[in-house]
Amino acid sequence: RAQDTAASFRRRVCELIAERPAGTLVPVARHLLSDPEDQVAEAAAAALGECRRFRKESPSCVAALSDAASHHEDPLVREAAEAALGVFGDTAGLPAILAGCQDKPAIRRRAVLALAAFHGPEVDAALERALTDRDWQTRQAAELLRD
């Protein structure tokens, strides 16, 4: 049960969803993205990234991931959400990814890598800014995508 009181159980549910994504489980992962335990929310974001093949679920997943990437208090959750948004490659998630390019270093790196799924002037501008980022790994990610 995804409503189990043990966070470790809810996290394991997310891990199982990621290992064997099924369309019927996408709403469970989406619900767990707002779990009060950060480790569960992070695992849910990762699981949703594995559920991208369920196109009918994409809009609600991208909306939930965008919200987590933009507003979640825990940086690991924001980072996992950025990665999942890059996997979906849905333009509805692009604003959250672009905003992530201005977040903490680990999130900036993940957001820059997520830009690989997108094209356009705002993506090019974000990559140009990332080339001069103070974090060398963010710069390296931008160089990788530019080449």
Image (tube, rainbow, N blue to C red):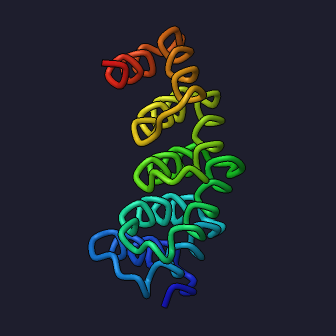
x and y, in percent, of residue 56 in the image:
49, 77
x and y, in percent, of residue 115 in the image:
46, 36
Please say if 4 is above or below 123: below
138 and 23: which one is in front?
Answer: 23
135 and 22: which one is in front?
Answer: 22
| Residue 123 as seen in the image, left or right of residue 25 | right
Question: What residue is shown at x 64% (from left), y 55% (from top)?
Answer: 68
29 and 22: which one is in front?
Answer: 22
84 and 78: which one is in front?
Answer: 84
x and y, in percent, of residue 136 in the image:
42, 13
| Residue 64 as seen in the image, left or right of residue 10 | right
x and y, in percent, of residue 66 in the image:
63, 54
Please say if 136 is above or below 105: above
Question: What residue is shown at x 61% (from left), y 35% (from top)?
Answer: 98
Point out the residue furthest to the bottom here.
Answer: 1
Count the labels in the image. 0
Q: In which quarter of the image is the C terminus?
A: top left
Residue 9, quarter of picture: bottom left
Question: What residue is shown at x 41% (from left), y 60% (from top)?
Answer: 49
Please say if 98 is above or below 4: above
Question: What residue is shown at x 51% (from left), y 75% (from top)?
Answer: 57
| Residue 27 as seen in the image, left or right of residue 137 | right
